[in-house]
Amino acid sequence: MTALPAELPALPSWDTPVVAPSLVLAPGPVPVPIYADEVWSLAPLVANPSAARPGLDWSRFPAPLLPQVQLAAWMMINTPLPASVLVGHPTWHSRLGPAGIHQSVLRWQRFCVWLHRQEGGGLHAVTEEVCISWAGHLARQPGASRGNVTKDLVALTRLWAFDAAGPAPSGMAMPPWHRLGVDGFLPRTPSPRRGENSTEVISPATMGPLLIWALRVVDDFADDILAAWAESRRMADAAVRTPATPDSKARLKSFLQDLIDRGQPVPSRANAGYRHALANTYIAARASCPSTQINNLLRTEPWQHLLAYVDANPGPCPLATPITGRIDGEPWTVFIDFTETRELMRHLGTACFIVLAYLTGMRPAEVLGLQAGCCPEVTSGRHLIYGREFKNAFDEDGNHHSAGRLREVPWVAIPPVVRAIRVLESLVPADGLLFDAAAHTFVDIPTRSTASLRFTGLHSRIEAFAAWASGRARVLGRDGEVVPDDPHGPIGLARFRRTLAWHIARRPGGLVALAIQYGHMRTAVSGGYAARGRDGIHQLLDIETARATADTLTNLHDDLARGVGISGPAARRAIHAAAQAPTFAGSIRTHRQARDILGNPALTVYDNPRSLLMCVYNRERALCHRMDADDAPRLDRCRPSCANIARTDHHAAQLLQHAQALEKQAASETVPGPLADRLARRAVQLRALADRHEHDRIHRQEPTP
């Protein structure tokens, strides 16, 4: 049996703090619970502003087992796992974070409920045979995976270890897998691959409109929304502070009666019932009276008919703030309604998150951990974002550090990101979190908090933002900018980072604004911090670039096998590269595999659908580089005379289609003469390229018998 410390801690009393004072990381509104509490909040252990604050609920544990399990949990919170237990388990941590403690206790709960149903008594009745029965029970559950069963077995090992190291050991037997390993106790079915590299990217059809609207809200609509919010707060304050006098009551009557006499709609708001409700605050501010006088007026006999009139004639609550934001030169809205300002502020904050998460490559927790002042102004060069990382933040003992650590290398910020940060800094207290949970509720009196918005709350806000953006697109007749549902489900938060890498690596054609942003990000990522940053998005970008290369070569290999022709100065190099496609297709999962492919000069083939060609990259022959020393092609700088160009029959067909479209435009009577001439000349050039392909095309050489 593994040896455990001989000196045991003192038995806790009913008023013993659950978390020792030296371990409290986040003193605040949540008090440190005491041992007698039915729920032990772990909030004092959480310093990550976006992390959950879980609690241990003891009400569902069987009574015979509760005292022993509580004592083990108290030990797990306050003491490290004995060093002797860690022998032979190099990946284990001596201390778990709050989430790990919470999950472990939930797994203990399932074990205790199962044990109680077996009439097993307390932990003293847990023998090796009982442990083996528990492992078999877990493995037989529908959908049981090796990963989940492993976590359950390791959790039971921790229960044994902390029980044995505590002040009142129960005599529970050591689980046999701690000595023999867990493989023999796991289900046969392998666990599915999980993690960032297997996360589904957001569909381009969804991500394109979503980013367009996020950028519009941040760049073009933010000033209008902020001005409307300030005006709505001024009006709300006036409705509360204006004293109730006979004159104010007369002004209210005059305001309402004038609307009724002219048959005009009355400012109203949506009501949960069958009728519209008066917009009391807005009306009070407009009539210069306190809002309380409105309800009092409705109780009087002459005005009881007003509710029926409002229900038949509901009206908006337009604010007088000007609309400066434009879409193609036209205002994005006629006015901002008083009743929608809070919703618009939430959408503004959500748009800022989308811009930050997507156009930096930060993980969600890193975005939510940013503070005001994280992106100082610069007079020259790029803006840098100084923040914390949490995923790989460990203390000197190798345990996860809840507060994270400052990144050794800052993130690079392109202009839209800087703008989003400046907008957020205007919403939160100085030096506060950019996504301060209290400030982003947009209550009348925001207060600073130590927590940011939660993942679940932001998930809902993103879905609401997409729905709002789609509504605006339909109102403005821009059906192509409606945000469609993603085929892989909700957008969530974790998918932005992988999607950015996918888009940069794939270089999709289409909207120019998006292509420019991808180009900026490629430059920022590769030239800014990627080569020096630890665990940055550059690794994910390498994987996506390698996958894109593999897909290009696989498609080219299949096309050549079907007899598709290829032309261009780099045609034979492309054929040689495509011949190696079957050796690595579908096998790129790690950064090392990606670097092996990207480091092989014989495989550097990139499709460029925007230029209707394929780049078989050779640094010495490339015309896209002049002064820089980049080791990847600049697909936004393709030159027709470059020696790295190759085209297939598919590219030639696309050249002809594009030429036909240009010729059709040039023939239109609505197109000015000079523009028509340019379009016609471009069509001639494209047809010449297609003809050259037809003349020079070659096929893959048949293998020699």
Image: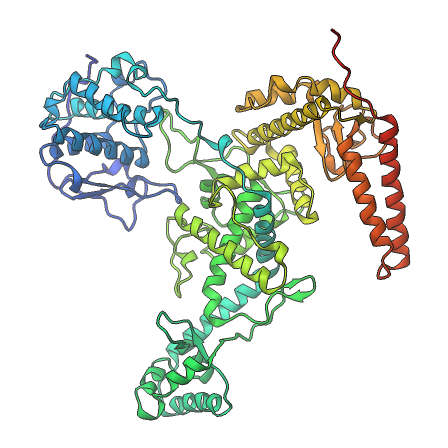
Image quadrant where one finds the C terminus: top right
* Foreground residue among 403 and 654: 654
* Residue 8 position (above or below residue 350): above
Tell which residue pokes out farthest to the top in this image: 705
Number of labels in the image equals 0
* Residue 373 position (above or below residue 700): below
Residue at screen point 75% across, 26% down: 564
* Residue 245 position (above or below residue 510): below
Horizontal side of 693 relative to 488 (left or right) equals right
Horizontal side of 214 relative to 1 (left or right) equals right
The image quarter containing residue 180 is top left
Expressed as whole percent of the image width and height from the top left, the position of residue 205 reads 59, 46
Expressed as whole percent of the image width and height from the top left, the position of residue 399 reads 35, 27
* Foreground residue among 182 and 361: 182
Horizontal side of 40 relative to 311 (left or right) equals left
The image quarter containing residue 447 is bottom left
Expressed as whole percent of the image width and height from the top left, the position of residue 409 reads 55, 34
Residue at screen point 43% across, 33% down: 391
Residue 426 visible here: no
The image quarter containing residue 365 is top left
Residue at screen point 73% across, 40% down: 610
Residue at screen point 68% across, 24% down: 558
Residue 339 visible here: yes
* Foreground residue among 231 and 386: 231
Image quadrant where one finds the N terminus: top left
